[in-house]
Image (cartoon, rainbow, N blue to C red):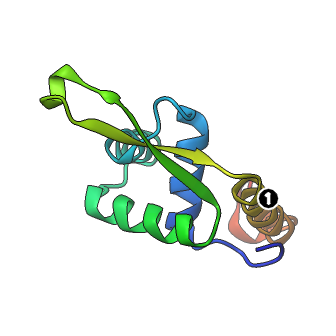
Amino acid sequence: MSRESLASFELLVLLAALQLGPEEAYTVSIADVIEAKTGRSVRRANVHTTLQRLEAKGLVSTRLGDPRPERGGKPRRLVELNPAGIGAIRATTDAIRALAAGVDDAIGGTA
């Protein structure tokens, strides 16, 4: 996925997972981070589906964590970014920065 850009929600999911780290990134925590940072309402099912798609693309890996007492012994499916996922974030954010450069005058502020 060297030059293919991520869809906006895929980028948000990857960024949230990266911020949380491999021991805390799972569907619910990712949705919570996206909501807190963007103010955007996020459905957990959408995060779950996006994570499946990102895993199929080889951008993330998932594994079962330790059983959690507050979840009735159910383990969380933890998410870790693969090197390709980091590369996809870099390629997408570089493209956004390149396109946004110089638009300050047109939009009346900073990009």
Classify 26 as above or below 91. above
Most foreground residue, 111 or 10: 10
> Which quadrant, please, contains the C terminus?
bottom right
Report how many numbered discs are placed on residues in the image.
1
Question: Residue 100, image x and y in percent?
Answer: 79, 66
Classify 13 as above or below 21. below
Crowding at dot 1, Cα within 10 Å, few <14 / some 14-19 / many 20+, comes out as some
Most foreground residue, 34 or 18: 18
Residue at (36% x, 48% y) in the render: 27
Residue at (86% x, 64% y) in the render: 101
Residue at (37% x, 38% y) in the render: 29
Classify 88 as above or below 110. below
Name the side, left or right, on which 1 lies relative to 43.
right
Name the side, left or right, on which 69 lies relative to 88.
left
Name the side, left or right, on which 86 lies relative to 101.
left
Residue 81 visible: yes
> Which quadrant, please, contains the N terminus?
bottom right
Name the side, left or right, on which 87 lies relative to 75.
right
Mark 1 secondary-structure assignment: helix
Residue 43 visible: no
Most foreground residue, 87 or 56: 56
- Give the amino acid at mark 1: Gly
Q: Which residue is mark 1?
A: 87
Question: Residue 73, image x and y in percent?
Answer: 18, 29
Most foreground residue, 97 or 28: 28
